[in-house]
Amino acid sequence: MNKLRLVKFFAGCLVCLVIVFSLGSSFAQEAKVAEGNRLFYQGNADYKEAKFQAAIDNYLKVLNLGLESGNLYYNLGNSYFKKGELGRAVLNYERALMLIPNDSDLKSNHEYVLSLLNLGQQSFENWLGKIANKLFADVSVNFLTVLLAFIYILALLALASSLIFAQAKRSIKILFLILPVIFIILAISLNSKIVYLSKGAVVVSKEALVKFEPREEATTYFKLSEGSKVLVLDKTQNWYKVKRPDGKIGWMDKDKLGLILDLTE
Amino acid sequence: MVMKIFRIAKILMALTFLLSSQVLAKDINFEATVNSNKVGLGQSLELDLTFDGSQNMPVPELSVIEGFQVRYLGPSTRMSIINGQATSSVTYVYTLLPVKVGVFKIGPFRFEHNGNTYNSNTINIEVLEEAAQAQNSSSQEGLPQAKDLKERIFLKLQLEKDKVYLNEVIPITIKLFVNKLGVRDIQFPRFNHDGFSVGEFGMPRQYQEVIGGINYEVIEFQSTIFGLKPGEFRLGPAAIQCNLITRKQANRQRPAPFDDFFNSDVFDNFFGGYQAYPLNLKSADIPVMVLLLPLENKPEGFSGALGVFDFQASVSPLEVKVGDPLTLKAVVTGQGNFNTVNLPGSSLGDDFKVYEPQVKQDKDAKTFDQVLIPLNASVKEIPAMNFNFFNPQTGVYAAITRGPFPVKVIKPDKAEELKITESKQPAPALTKEEKLGRDIIYIKDNPGQLRKKGEYLYKHKIFLWLQVIPLLFYLLMVILHARRRKLAADVKYARQLLAPRRAKAGILRARELLKKGSAGEFYDVLFGVLQEYLGNKFHLPSKGITISIIDEQLKHKSIPEEILVNLRNIFSECDMVRYAASQLTKENMQNSLERLEEIIDYLQRNRV
């Protein structure tokens, strides 16, 4: 009996600790968000006064707090655009597209900056990936993840129902034909978005030379213009091994690239 | 009608016999035949491996046959019923393509199946040169010919030199040599080119070449390659796929009334007397060394251009107002890797607004059109342009300088000052001009939902773990479904599962009767519980359970004597209550109930 009491006591303590910690971290997060909001509005005020560098500094401070939002990246992209740094504008629009892909203002600005840089659609996927991406172009990574989980649960429920309701097997069979196709297309689209999110990068300098080897004196293999998209395949201290949409691979100076998912920024 | 049924029955019996695989090995005859014992180089012949007596033999795997290339074509089965006796056979057909002249003995072919070994006969085949001569044109008559197929048709990979500089473009040639053979459906060659970039092959060239006195038809494919990294590499082997047109030998084993007439060459040719034999030809590979460009005498501003080039430059117009565009045209011509050629350098300083050049690349020229806008009237000339390149033929760096180009820049009228007029040639800057009036859409007023950076759902551990729940739910449903089906289908299992539950309910009822003290009813219930439990447990009719039946069931199950004694006692007490209910006290009843619980507990725990 005493043992049971002891166990109950420790379990109670554990629950209390978890509640205290989660409340603590929740309060800390709320404080961060409040500070982030303040800095964001400060950035907007600077932008309105055409103090674009000050606006950028304030938006970057929000990022440095470890916070992000689609609107924040959008405003940051606009600020860089106004400052004439089109590569960084593209980078932040690309980041925003991961969070608010169906925002019409964002799509318009992104397309406009790309047209100024004489860049068209740059895609790393094969034909199947392109089709899947076109279907779910306006869907964010998180929503796509939920959708995929929903289809997965639906498939398992259909399987379970086929066990219980033997007479409904025919209609369930039709469901079995459709669900895998939807699941595969969703999975392909999500995979390509995740690959781009984790490995994607944008050239932020006016021009970048891509070399055969990660050395300054190495032969130049090809050039990348500002705003070009690449995938980062490997890293050394100062160099990134990058892949162009046409499949060419070389090494370039890491300072000339901005990563889509840069947790250090 | 009776006859018809009888005939169908005979056919069915014969078919049953054929389909059964119980044919004895000694009844199966394994024979190898060819359609001709003489064949010319460049002709093919048919090899038939026949199993008489069964159609259930797998395809024999033929090992290498000396002097021939072997290709499996397919099976052919035969079945006949004569006077109710059914015979069946299967023939596996192969094409043999002779690769050299001589007499060859093929077989005996040994084949093992189901622990039985089958041996075929041997066949002698003579491979002649004549037939090949007969099918070729008379223009080659009298010339010697190769006696080996490898000398009749082969592939060569040729490179101009075996030491090249990094990015140096060199031609590569792949030649297909054919001597007195019919070849068609020749595919474009492929070759291993690790460390090199390869251009596309153009249309092949066809000509004749004599090697060692033998006249060959040559099909030549040409392309260019350049090294991508320094080091030692092996280029090739090159491979080509084509079809060798071989003449079928007349089948002497199938004589027919009009054999001579229909086996004539005219009919052979018209009705497919020739057949295509697929060939994969491979050349030897060749070593190539890719060298780095020398560092000594490397000119400043060298941007990697490699080849033998000439360079011309011009400026137009030669007289402009400040703010008007000038076009500087630079043309690099020659032979080499134009991918390495960049706009020749010049020091334009701050006197010009410079636009990105428009580049046009042809096979042997690269043109740069650069728009320059003079920003002040002090500009008198466009500075000289230097083009540096490395000549791989001489192994030295070369430089060509053009200019300076004198120009006259006039100060504009005040109204026109610094107005940029449209150039005759499209320049990238004009694209921006066309988009005047368009700008980005204004910033967002609110930050939206600020959240932790990089925190996506697909990385969220709790979300990922939650995905296991539906899977567990499904597995649970599968287990429950399987259990339900088993309960419905297996009565014994269902009764065994039910036994303790029902017994528990009975014991509760007995306990209530114990409290009331009604011995008669108590022992009736107790006896009923015991009967039902044991009946369910051992899958016996419950009402007919007696101590003798239970003894019979339990005697082989090594049950402790104490349990058996208890069981017998309960049965006897239940009997006794019918005659002398008054002798059994409440204590006896309590003991009986406890003993019953003990028995059920033991039988459940020990899974008797």
Image: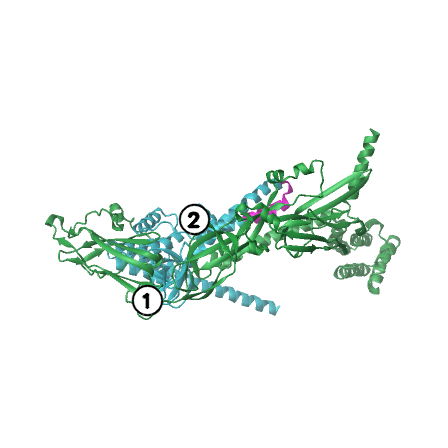
Chain colours: A cyan, B green
Query: What kind of secondary structure does the magenta stretch mostly adopt?
Result: helix
Which residue in the protein does label 1 denote? B396
Number of numbered discs visible in the structure rendering? 2
Residue plotted at (64% across, 42% down): A166
Residue A238 sits in which quadrant? bottom left
Q: Position of residue B276 (x, y in %)?
A: 58, 46
Give amino acid for label 2.
Answer: Val
The answer to whether B217 appears left or right of B89 in the picture is left
Quarter placement of the C terminus of chain B: bottom right
Give amino acid for label 1.
Answer: Val
Q: Which residues are magenta?
A: A153-168
Disc 2 element: loop
Q: Residue furthest bottom?
A: B296
Give the CA distance from mark 2 to mark 1.
58 Å
Q: Is residue B265 visible?
A: yes
Disc 1 element: strand
- Confirm whether the magenta stretch covers residue A40: no
Nearer-the-camera pick, B589 or B466: B466
Look at the numbered discs 2 and 1 and tell me whether their residues touch, using CB distance below 8 Å: no
Chain letter of disc 2? A
Q: Residue furthest front?
A: B142
Which residue in the protein does label 2 denote? A139
